[in-house]
Image (spheres, rainbow, N blue to C red):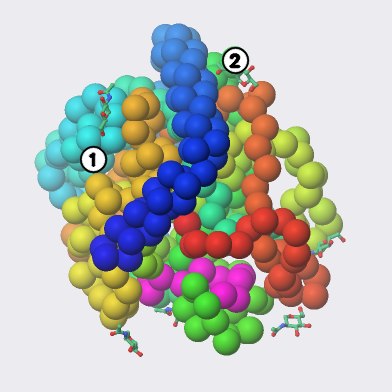
Amino acid sequence: MFFTKTLVLSLAALAAAHPGHEQEEKRQAIAARSTMAANKRALDNCAASLNKRGLHSAAAERRQAEVERQRISRGLPINNGRVKRSSVEKRNTTDVLAKDHQGTLDGQRAINDELYVFQDEKCTVLNPQGEVGPFYVPGEYIRSDLRENELGVEIFIDAQFIDVNTCEPIVGGWFDVWNCNSTGVYTGIQSDMNGNGDDASNLNNTALRGIQQTDENGVVQFLSMFPGHYSGRVNHMHVVFHTEATVLPNGTLTGGNVPHIGQFFWDQDLIDTVEATAPYNINNQSVTLNSEDHVFGEQETEGSDSDPVFNYVYLGDDITDGLFTWIVVGINTSASYTPTYSFELTEGGGVAVDGQDGGGFPA
Ligand SMILES: *[C@@H]1O[C@H](CO)[C@@H](O)[C@H](O)[C@H]1NC(C)=O
Ligand SMILES: *[C@@H]1O[C@H](CO)[C@@H](O)[C@H](O)[C@H]1NC(C)=O
Ligand SMILES: *[C@@H]1O[C@H](CO)[C@@H](O)[C@H](O)[C@H]1NC(C)=O
Ligand SMILES: *[C@@H]1O[C@H](CO)[C@@H](O)[C@H](O)[C@H]1NC(C)=O
Ligand SMILES: *[C@@H]1O[C@H](CO)[C@@H](O)[C@H](O)[C@H]1NC(C)=O
Ligand SMILES: *[C@@H]1O[C@H](CO)[C@@H](O)[C@H](O)[C@H]1NC(C)=O
């Protein structure tokens, strides 16, 4: 927490010393929010047509079926838990923080109630450009299971992407994700700001990173591990969305356009529950809450309609049985951003690259 405050103060001091820089940041933030508001209005206009075409109810059925598959594959009872569904409208950082994203199932309830848990009344529109952070690694593999040998709480992710310009699912787009492991270390990079900076073997480690293509419903699914935390940041997942990219023979991606860069989050009480379990609980880096995290606030939710927080249900009775998480995302496919990076995965393994301006604080 001390680290966060110091960092915020020093950035503020820096901005004050460079008024031109501050004005430019403000201009960009205002421009980003008005773009976001336009996206949101466009998507609100989509809601009726998406419902009419049964997109929402189809998604609810898919999520329910997937939860059952995940439970069966883990030897867990198919139904369990309590019904709890918050319908708080999200509008701003404080509202997103206050919203409870948990929906739990009740074995005693009728099937329609279960569907209700998975039903999205509205799509989430994300702020146009959140932070990519310095630890993006291009060239990672197209695959759905990112766990490798990492330990922690498993998360099954169901994400659906809607084009705010057409109200259609984005078919054939690419969802590129990465997050740190349970003790707050990213794979694929080597840095003093990331675990043991002398550990070169981490360069060839591909765990918790991967890319999947959206299907005819704009849907992508991943199996990964709930991220831990590191100094200055709350637990989060990084997201880059690609369109019109090319698949290489070795199962990696190249080229195309990036209409979205951002980060996804989880409810604070869920984070606290996960962090109390092993091996998250041996991580002694300082803790940052959602309410203190600059990306959660300024970058992704403040003064916007964005809700970049995963909905979720427990797969079993215990958090260690894993989570099913889902999110519906509106993206302006006409937008275009350039992710920066300092490391790349190549046929020779992970390598540092120069001149991509990806250095600096872990974000
Ligand atoms: C989508 O992005 C394009 C290019 O930046 C912009 O011209 C257009 O207004 C955006 N559409 C919406 C709905 O925000
Ligand atoms: C997280 O990753 C680092 C680097 O690969 C590794 O040293 C550490 O043991 C990992 N944490 C756990 C709990 O496996
Ligand atoms: C954090 O834990 C590691 C080993 O688990 C230890 O080496 C290090 O000294 C600890 N750091 C602090 C600040 O307690
Ligand atoms: C959003 O929250 C900020 C403080 O976090 C506040 O200054 C602003 O007025 C709020 N905006 C709206 C539209 O409520
Ligand atoms: C995949 O193939 C491309 C094109 O040949 C190459 O540049 C890249 O290094 C390869 N990546 C891996 C992980 O083998
Ligand atoms: C990473 O793997 C490549 C082969 O794929 C190997 O040549 C290289 O030495 C490895 N790097 C490290 C740091 O272990």
Question: Is 127 drawn above or below residue 36 in the view shown?
Answer: below
Q: Secondary structure at mark 2?
A: loop
Question: Which labelled disc corresponds to residue 166?
Answer: 2
Residue named by callout 1 = 97
Q: Amino acid at mark 2?
A: Thr
Residue 282 seen in the current view: yes
Q: Position of residue 35 (x, y in %)?
A: 51, 21
Q: Left or right: where does residue 112 sit relative to residue 348? A: left
Q: Main secondary structure of the magenta part?
A: loop
Residue 186: percent from the left, percent from the top? 51, 69
In the image: residue 108, left or right of residue 169: left
Which residue occupies the foreground of this view, 46 or 84? Answer: 46
Check whether the beta carbons of the residues at disc 1 and disc 2 lie within 8 A of each other.
Answer: no
In the rendered structure, which segment of residues is drawn in magenta? 182-191
Q: Is residue 230 above or below residue 292?
A: below
In percent of width and height, residue 232 lies at 36, 62
Q: Residue 304, how many percent across, how many down?
A: 37, 27
Report how far apart the C-alphas of labels 1 and 2 lie in the structure. Answer: 30 Å
Per the image, is 189 magenta? yes
Disc 2: residue Cβ within 8 A of ligand 1's nearest atom? no
